[in-house]
Every structure is written in C-alpha cells, then in structure tokens.
Image (tube, rainbow, N blue to C red):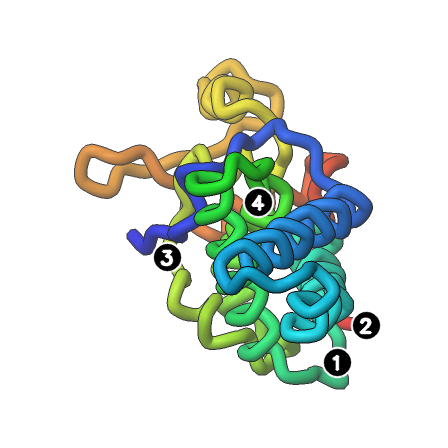
C-alpha cells in the first residue's frame, strides 16, 4: 500500500475549488516573498524579482485540479511529470511556512495532490490514458482504503463505511489486505461513479 506524503493533512469533507487553490497559491507566494526579504534583508520588491511571479504555480494548480478533481485528461498531453513534481514541491514549501511562519496551511492544494494519486490508481488499467505522471505512478495501489474512497467521493469516512454494510442500498464491496479493509479498484470505480461529487475520468 503506497502512502501519499500529503495524506495526513487531508480531510475528506473539506471543500475544494479552483478558486480556493489559487488563493492558497497567492498566500504561499506572499509568505515566500516575506521570508526571502527577511532572510537576506532586502525589500519585498527585490524578493519578488528573485522569485518571479505566482503565475507558474497557479498554472500548475489549475492543470492538476482539472485531472484530480474534474477528471479531465488531455489527449494531447503535456509535461505532466514536471507539473506534478513542481506543484508538490511548492506545496511542501507551503507546509514548512505553516510550521515556521504561522502561515495558513495549504489544505486544498494538498487535497488535490492526494486526489491525483488516487485517481491515477483508478485510471491505471485504462488503455486510452497514456503518460500518467511518474510521480503519480509511484502512488499506484492495487486497491483503495475507505479513507481514499471518502476523499474522492468528498464524503465522510463514516458514510463510506456505512456503505459497506450488507443493508446498504448500493453496497460497496470490500476485502481484507492483512488487517486492513480495502476495496479493489474496479469496485471502487463502480461505486464512486454513482456518486454525484465524483467525476469519472474523461479523455478530452
């Protein structure tokens, strides 16, 4: 079972939107500017010249959001590896600023990275999707945990657990992996596809 480094910070029912992502990017960039200007005793204008602008991480946030949350996979493809790796590094930096500068945690961005890894597992057997970023391939699992399903369905883990009961109307079938309760990918995709908050991946 692979573990996403951002998973510990993600709550399944936390709302997620592109607007929230872009806001977090701006907040992290502003803290970066402040930290750099303080560290090297330079003014913020000079720090911004060194860092550039927030345009690149905003672009990354949008590209990754479209796949992870909206389920849009471009048939043309692009440099997915660099996009996901760069966004992950940017978000990890944001988490450091939470600990050292009291910045707001990048919860939405972390959730997008986690959802990207989970969706990559769900799409791993599809022949019409090529070039899944290597950073996401490294998170492939042969099955999903109930927490991962809850994150993709944007439901509470308790609600997903209730869906595994024999009396559930659309029962989510589970299996055991050691002591853990897990769901095979085909069953996870079947069940998630029936949830209004989940968008099955479409090649566009």
Q: Are marks 4 and 3 in contact (CB under 8 Å)?
A: no
Looking at the picture, how far across and down is residue 51, in whole percent? 64, 71
Q: Does dot 1 land on a helix, a strand or a loop?
A: loop
Q: Upstream in the sequence, badge 2 or badge 4?
A: 4
Q: Are marks 3 and 1 in contact (CB under 8 Å)?
A: no
Q: Could one spot residue 107 in this view of the protein? A: yes
Q: Upstream in the sequence, badge 4 or badge 3?
A: 4
- Compared to residue 175, the image places residue 160 above or below, namely above
Q: Residues within 10 Å of mark 3 (few under 14, many from 20)?
A: some
Q: Is residue 136 left or right of residue 55?
A: left
Q: CA distance from mark 2 to mark 4?
A: 23 Å
Q: Which residue is mark 1?
A: 75
Q: CA distance from mark 1 to mark 4?
A: 24 Å
Q: CA distance from mark 3 to mark 1?
A: 25 Å
Q: Upstream in the sequence, badge 1 or badge 2?
A: 1
Residue at screen point 32% across, 38% down: 175
Residue at screen point 44% across, 34% down: 146
Q: Which residue is mark 3?
A: 142
Q: Upstream in the sequence, badge 3 or badge 1?
A: 1
Q: CA distance from mark 1 to mark 2?
A: 6 Å
Q: Upstream in the sequence, badge 1 or badge 4?
A: 1
Q: Does dot 3 land on a helix, a strand or a loop?
A: loop
Q: Which mark is residue 111?
A: 4
Looking at the picture, how far across and down is residue 57, in whole percent? 68, 65
Q: CA distance from mark 4 to mark 3?
A: 21 Å
Looking at the picture, how far across and down is residue 106, in whole percent? 59, 43
Looking at the picture, how far across and down is residue 23, in whole percent? 76, 46
């Amino acid at each position: 079972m692979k573990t996403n480094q951002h998973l510990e910070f993600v709550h399944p029912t936390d709302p997620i939107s592109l607007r929230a992502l872009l806001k977090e990017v701006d907040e992290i960039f502003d803290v970066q500017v402040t930290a750099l200007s303080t560290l090297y005793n330079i003014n913020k204008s000079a720090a911004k010249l060194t860092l550039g602008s927030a345009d690149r991480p905003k672009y990354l946030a949008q590209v990754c959001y479209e796949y992870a949350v909206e389920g849009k996979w471009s048939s043309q493809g692009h440099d997915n590896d660099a996009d996901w790796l760069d966004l992950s590094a940017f978000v990890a930096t944001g988490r450091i600023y939470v600990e050292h500068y009291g910045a707001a945690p990048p919860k939405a961005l972390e959730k997008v990275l986690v959802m990207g890894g989970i969706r990559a597992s769900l799409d791993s057997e599809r022949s019409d999707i090529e070039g899944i970023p290597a950073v996401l391939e490294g998170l492939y699992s042969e099955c999903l945990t109930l927490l991962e399903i809850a994150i993709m369905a944007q439901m509470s883990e308790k609600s997903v657990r209730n869906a595994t009961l024999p009396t559930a109307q659309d029962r989510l079938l589970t299996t055991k992996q050691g002591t853990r309760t897990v769901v095979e990918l085909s069953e996870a995709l079947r069940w998630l596809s029936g949830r209004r908050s989940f968008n099955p991946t479409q090649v566009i």
